[in-house]
Amino acid sequence: MAEYEKFQHDVLVIGSGGAGLRAAIEASATGVTVGVVSKSLLGKAHTVMAEGGVAAALANVDNRDDWKVHFTDTMRGGQYLNNWRMAELHAKEAPDRVRELEAWGALFDRTKDGKILQRNFGGHKFPRLAHVGDRTGLEMIRTLQDHGIHQGIDFYQEYTVISLLKEDGRVTGAFAYDREKGRFKVFQAKAIIIATGGMGKIYKITSNSWECTGGGISLAYHAGAELLDMEFIQFHPTGMVWPPSVRGLLITEGVRGEGGVLRNSEGNRFMFDDVPDLYRHQTSDNEEEGWKYTQGDPNAKRPPELLTRDHVARCIYREVKEGRGSPHGGVFLDIAWIKEKISNAPEHIKRKLPSMYHQFKELAGIDITQEPMEVGPTTHYIMGGIKVDPDSQMTAMPGLFAAGECAVGLHGANRLGGNSLSDLLVFGKRAGEFAAKFAQENNQAPIPEQQLEQEAKWALAPFERGQTEENAFHIQGELQEMMQDLVGIVRTEEGLGDAVNRIAGYWERAEKIGSGGNREFDPGWHTALDLKHMLTVAESIARAAKERKESRGGHYRQDYVEKSDEYGKVNISVRKADDGSMEVKQVVKDPIREDLQQIIEELG
């Protein structure tokens, strides 16, 4: 019999990023007991990497903005595959969530008359991103932590959840281990909220931190929840490409929002060459008008660098592939050019983009106030994830909720910059509210002892096998290379089929991983356990991408380059079949409510 320590809470939150903290705060406010399990340390959440701002129609800079415009921008950016109800709730509730954050102590940048300042961002019609320089996510986490630690919430740091426990058709708890000692922990809960973020670490080049292995998405899948839209991966256009040690590290879209331009090795602003018809009426065709837009001129059109992320990433990819890239395989992002427009440009750049200035100065030896940066696409965000009820955030599994990047619906085929942070606030709050309600209305179900023993046996299997030829790090590295090459920015039927076959091979090899060490902080063992989640998510992405035979948003098929009316009406669903296999099928979208359709037609 395995030994384990037990904890009990009404609501258990897995993940301590923006969504997890906001959910925990809301649940705790109802009087239920709340526990938060964090894979890493509190404050280390990947939310801090969201630098540019939080999108909310406050209308502080341009009074023409409102929830209807924000809703329409979000739907258009998502290529109309979004869950329209989530897009509606998000647009309506984001302003209140931002003001609430301000009331809790968030120190936003200010307009001259003292209101929260807002900046332009890709895909947004008006200046909409409330920001704190280029450190908005960090300020959000600081504020939520400072507020949350006074709410009576119990935090469990450096604990990794291996699986969810089920009894009588509902979740009853979670099975975990502490990363330092390797000792098992059992959490009993009436309701569980998954808020574990993304899965960028299944790719070679990513802006994501080591924690982002898709664990929460995989936990829900294996517990019986449905996944949607897994084929839609956002490759952020601007990650560092040099030096190799920092390749993929994020460069905020705020650089372009403040006037930064993209050029190829020939010095051309190549984004002018390819503006989609959908955005042509909103996009400038000359440098002067684009500059006026970034400076807040309400009558100017936005520069093409601020088109949606999927489009900008593909344009950069094209320039590199066709031989017009920078020396290290990217293109040039130039903010230094604004010295032609502003007399105090260096000081202005340092004030507006302090993190970017220090990041390049310290890591690449480049002064961005004087010379351009080298940038290239980096795996950044997954639009797909766990299917939830748009109002309550509960999954198909009773008692199991999800919020943030690991949940699906708001973003459709492509996320607009800044919508991720308001997503965390709006739906983190809702998940906490409804999880607490569920906990108050239901009794605690028992912990299934037999499942506990099975999970413990599986987790300890590498030690039982002893040292073998299979190494978890080798398999992880091969998976990352393969996903980058075959399931990356550009995809084909042949490549996706090859990816599915290779993943099957990785599954077989993962079951043979052995360890000659012990459970005391053993990174090899941690990686071996994480591989289950990484392979689950990678397979779901590859299979869903193979099923969607069109190009839309973050999914680009070289063999099906056009959008399809047929696929514009369906989401790709992934579920675990009774025999354990992965079941992939098309699900017809619910028709949009008539009044919302009218808003899109009027504003789109």
Image: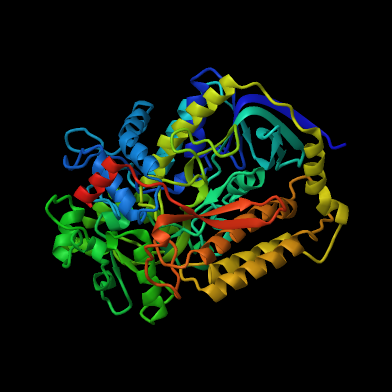
The foreground one among 326 and 153 is: 153
Q: Position of residue 420 (x, y in %)?
A: 41, 46
Q: How many marks?
A: 0
Image point 21% across, 64% down: which residue? 280
- Farthest-out residue, left: 299
Q: Quadrant of residue 34?
A: top right
Q: Is residue 234 above or below residue 25?
A: below
Side of 390 where 470 appears, left or right: right
Please name the residue shown 74% across and 30% down the image.
Answer: 447
Q: Is residue 361 visible?
A: no
Direction bottom: furthest residue: 323
- Residue nearer the viewer, 368 or 154: 154
What scheme was used to colour the molecule? rainbow
Q: Residue at x 76, y 30 (%)?
A: 5
| 483 and 566: which is toward the camera | 566
Reply above or below: 479 against 108. below
Given the current orientation, which residue lies at the most extreme top position?
A: 31
Q: Is residue 10 above or below residue 331?
A: above
Residue 70 at what x, y percent from top left?
28, 44
Q: Is residue 258 visible?
A: yes
Q: Is residue 30 left or right of residue 255?
A: right
Which residue: 26% across, 56% down? 346
Q: Is 247 left or right of 291, judged from the image as shown?
A: right
Query: Would you identify the image quadrant in which residue 2 lies?
Result: top right
The quarter in which the N terminus is drawn is: top right
Residue 426 percent location from the top left of the image: 40, 35
Q: Position of residue 242 (x, y in %)?
A: 46, 68
